[in-house]
Image (cartoon, rainbow, N blue to C red):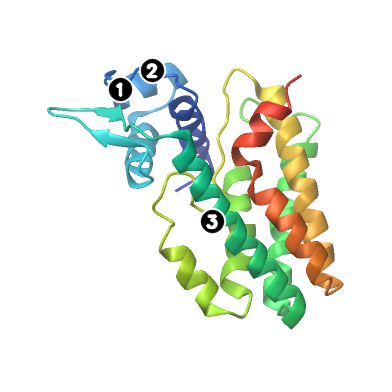
């Protein structure tokens, strides 16, 4: 999925979880494409991805509807993911990371820094951030040195908001999103520093905090 398609997915995801769609409202790729000013392809891919995440479900006929999901279920999924990511970061700090993983993490941070610090961000400043964010989280999960952690994650990745690097953007609050994502970028920098220093406790604590940011930070960083 391209960075543009990831952006559309993040915007639609945020609308779904924030109650932007009524329980019985039909969600279609045509309506999303018109609302966001995009082609039907990224809209269709976004709906397919959200169905895979368990946030929406196909309805009789054509289109989708929001799947009834409790806030508690989402919080529980995020908590389990956070525990696994924190353990992966701690394990990597204890065992040391390979040069390949370090380069991958550094490249991800360089990409998000360029996106956030651009003087003229253009019409879609968040394009590319999501892909770089996913790459950072996957590098730690798959490269920590304990395959059982990644195996345990595979058991929950299909749950709502359990996917690594999941983001949700609010299309009308771009300034707030930039502040929130700047915090996330800074946490990536701290995590990489802890990994380089082999500081397991710091890496674990920061990753745990960072993993809980998906929903919580969206409410905290309001301007």
Indicate the position of residue 38 as horizontal and vertical percent values: 43, 26
Indicate the position of residue 159 as horizontal and vertical percent values: 41, 49
Residue 162, placed above or below residue 152: above
Q: Say if residue 112 shows up in the picture.
A: yes
Characterize the local packing of mark 3: few (<14), some (14-19) or many (20 or more) Cα atoms within 10 angstroms: some
Residue bearing mark 2: 34
Which of the 4 image quadrants contains residue 102?
A: bottom right
Q: Are marks 1 and 2 in contact (CB under 8 Å)?
A: yes
- 70 and 84: which one is in front? 70
Indicate the position of residue 177 as horizontal and vertical percent values: 68, 29
Q: Nearer the viewer, mark 1 or mark 3?
A: 3
Question: Left or right: 191 with respect to 213?
Answer: right
Q: Are marks 1 and 3 in contact (CB under 8 Å)?
A: no
Question: Left or right: 148 with respect to 132?
Answer: left
Residue bearing mark 1: 30
Q: Secondary structure at mark 2?
A: helix
Q: Marks 2/3: CA distance?
A: 36 Å
Characterize the local packing of mark 2: few (<14), some (14-19) or many (20 or more) Cα atoms within 10 angstroms: few
Residue 186, placed above or below residue 8: below
Give the residue at x 64% y 69%.
Answer: 88
Characterize the local packing of mark 1: few (<14), some (14-19) or many (20 or more) Cα atoms within 10 angstroms: some
Q: Are marks 2 and 3 in contact (CB under 8 Å)?
A: no
Give the residue at x 79% y 71%.
Answer: 200
Give the residue at x 64% y 20%.
Answer: 173
Q: Marks 1/2: CA distance?
A: 6 Å
Q: Locate the C terminus by quadrant.
A: top right
- Number of marks drawn: 3
Residue bearing mark 3: 80
Question: Left or right: 183 with respect to 166?
Answer: right
Residue 176, placed above or below residue 149: above
Residue 105, placed above or below residue 128: below
């Amino acid at each position: 999925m391209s960075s543009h398609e990831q952006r559309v997915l993040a915007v639609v995801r945020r609308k779904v979880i924030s109650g932007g769609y009524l329980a019985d409202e039909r969600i279609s790729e045509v309506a999303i494409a018109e609302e966001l000013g995009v082609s039907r392809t990224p809209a269709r891919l976004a709906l397919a991805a959200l169905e895979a995440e368990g946030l929406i479900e196909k309805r009789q006929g054509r289109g989708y509807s929001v799947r009834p999901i409790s806030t508690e279920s989402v919080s529980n999924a995020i908590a389990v993911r956070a525990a696994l990511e924190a353990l992966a970061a701690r394990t990597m700090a204890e065992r040391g990371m390979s040069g390949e993983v370090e380069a991958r993490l550094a490249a991800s941070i360089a990409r998000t820094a360029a996106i956030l610090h651009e003087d003229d961000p253009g019409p879609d400043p968040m394009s590319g951030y999501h892909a770089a964010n996913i790459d950072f989280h996957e590098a730690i999960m798959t490269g920590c040195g304990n395959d059982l952690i990644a195996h345990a994650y595979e058991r929950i990745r299909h749950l709502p908001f359990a996917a690594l690097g999941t983001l949700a953007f609010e299309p009308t609050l771009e300034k707030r999103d930039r502040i929130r994502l700047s915090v996330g970028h800074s946490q990536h920098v701290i995590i990489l520093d802890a990994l380089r220093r082999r500081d397991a406790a710091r890496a674990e604590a920061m990753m745990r905090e960072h993993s809980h940011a998906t929903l919580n930070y969206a409410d905290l960083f309001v301007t």
